[in-house]
Amino acid sequence: MTSRTFLGVAVAAGVIGYVSTSAQEAVNPADLLKDPSVKAAVDAAKANEAQAIDDQIRFCEVAAPSFKETARGAVLKKVFEELGLANVRVDKAGNVLGDRPGTAPRPRFVIAAHLDTVFPEGTDVKVKREGAVLHGPGIGDDCRGLAVLVGIIRSLKQANVQTPGSITFVADVGEEGLGDLRGMKQLFNDTMKGQIDRFVSIDGTDLGITNVAVGSHRYRVTFKGPGGHSFGAFGLANPIDAMGRAIAKIAEFQVPKQPKTTFNVGRVGGGTSVNSIPFEGWMEVDMRSSDPASLASVDASFHKAVDSAVVEENERWGTPRMITVVKDLVGDRPAGSTREDSPIVRTAQAVNRALGFAVRLGEGSTDANVPMSLGIPSITIGAGGRGTDAHALTESFDTTNSWQGTQRAVLLTIALAR
C-alpha cells in the first residue's frame, strides 16, 4: 500500500504511524487530518451529533448516584459491546472497560468519562428539551462526557481508523463527592496498573483543557462527650461548643492566593434537643490546593485547630479529657499537574488549533488527579456545548455546536493512540 510522510507522520490507508519521530514528541494534528480515514472520523463526529445527544439523554435518565452506578454502567457496557469493543468487562470497583486494539498493544491510551452524579436516590432524572437546551440533573456533568466517549468509538468504527497504539475506553465510578475517585484509584492501582501510557478524562462541557489537578482532603470530625440536661447537668463540657471553637479557628486560617488554597466547613450537625447538652456534634471539612505542600500545610493547621479546641473546651469547665474527638479522612484526592510543555498538553492544544478552536488551559478536580499524581501524562478535556448550573437540580446543557466537543475528542484520541 502507498504511504505518505508529513513531518514524521506516515499515513497509509487508514493506518496512522510514525517514522523517525520520538514517542515522546507531540503530534501535529493538522498533518493527521490529511489522512482520509482520520478526516472521515472527524467528519463522522459532527454528522453523528444527533445520536450523541440522544445517547446523552438516554444515559442521563438512568440514575447513578455515587456508589450506585451499576444500572447506568450496565447501559454503557451494552453500548461498548454493540459498537464492537473487545474484552468488555467490569472491574472490582464497577468501572466498565472496553478495548480497541491497535497494531500493537503499546502504547496504551486510556480515555474515560465518569458514570456517577452528585444527586441522591429518588431524584427526578427525566430530561426535558426546550429547543437546543436540555434540562436535567447531570446532563452536562457527566452525561455529556459519556455521550462523547461513545461518540469517539462510533466515529472510529465508521471511518475504519486503525491506530498504532491501543485504546481502552472507560466509564468509571466514584468521581463525584465522597466517591473520592475510587474508580480511578482502582484503575491505576489494580485493574490496569503499569499498563497505561497516557490518559484523558472527559468531564463537563466547553472546550477547555485541564492540566492542573486540584487536590483535596475531606474530614468528618466527631466531637463526643457524656451529655446531660441543659439545666441540671450544667457545667459539663459541650461537644458542640468544642466544635464551635474549632470552626472559629478554621475561619481565621491564612492561606496562599497562589497557588490557590481553600478551606470550608460545609456541614455541621449533632445534639438531641434544645434543652440537652449534646453527647455528640460533627462537622465536615474540605481543604483544597493544586500544590501538595500547601495542601499539607492547611491540613496540619486543621488538625492543630481541632485538637486545641478540644483542650480549650475541657479546660473551660475543668473537665480534662471529657470531650474527645475523632477525625475521619473521608476524601483524599491527590494534587498534581502535567507540564504545559509536555507532549500530551502540546498535542491537545494543537488539536484545538487544527480544528479552529480557542486554546484555554485550566485547573480542576477530576479523574485525571490520580494519574497526574503518579506522573502519567494526563489531562482532562471538556465535552463541548455549554453547561450551566452543574451539581444543581436546574442543570442544563446547550447543544449549540456541541459536535465540536466530539470532534475534538476524536482527533485527540487518534493523536494520542500512537
Image (cartoon, grey):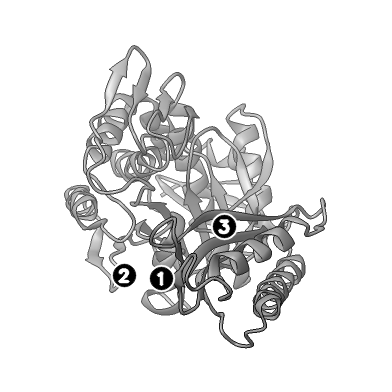
In-front residue for pair 254/399:
254
**Picture disc at residue 187:** 1
The picture quadrant where one finds residue 317 is bottom right
Q: State which tag comes first along the sequence, 3 or 1.
A: 3
Mark 2 — residue?
A: 93
Q: Nearer the viewer, mark 1 or mark 2?
A: 2
Side of 94 where 312 appears, left or right: right
The image shows residue 350 at horizontal and vertical percentages of 65, 41
Q: What's the amino acid at mark 2?
A: Ala
Query: What secondary structure is found at the residue carrying circle 3?
Result: strand
**Residue at (20% x, 48% y) in the render:** 79
The image shows residue 319 at horizontal and vertical percentages of 62, 85
User: What is the C-alpha distance between the residues marked 3 and 2?
Assistant: 36 Å
Side of 376 where 150 appears, left or right: left
Question: Do callouts 3 and 1 mark residues in contact (Cβ within 8 Å)?
Answer: no
The image shows residue 398 at horizontal and vertical percentages of 43, 22
Residue 107 in view of the camera: no
| Number of residue marks | 3
The image shows residue 371 at horizontal and vertical percentages of 55, 67
Q: What's the amino acid at mark 3?
A: Tyr
Residue 380 in view of the camera: yes
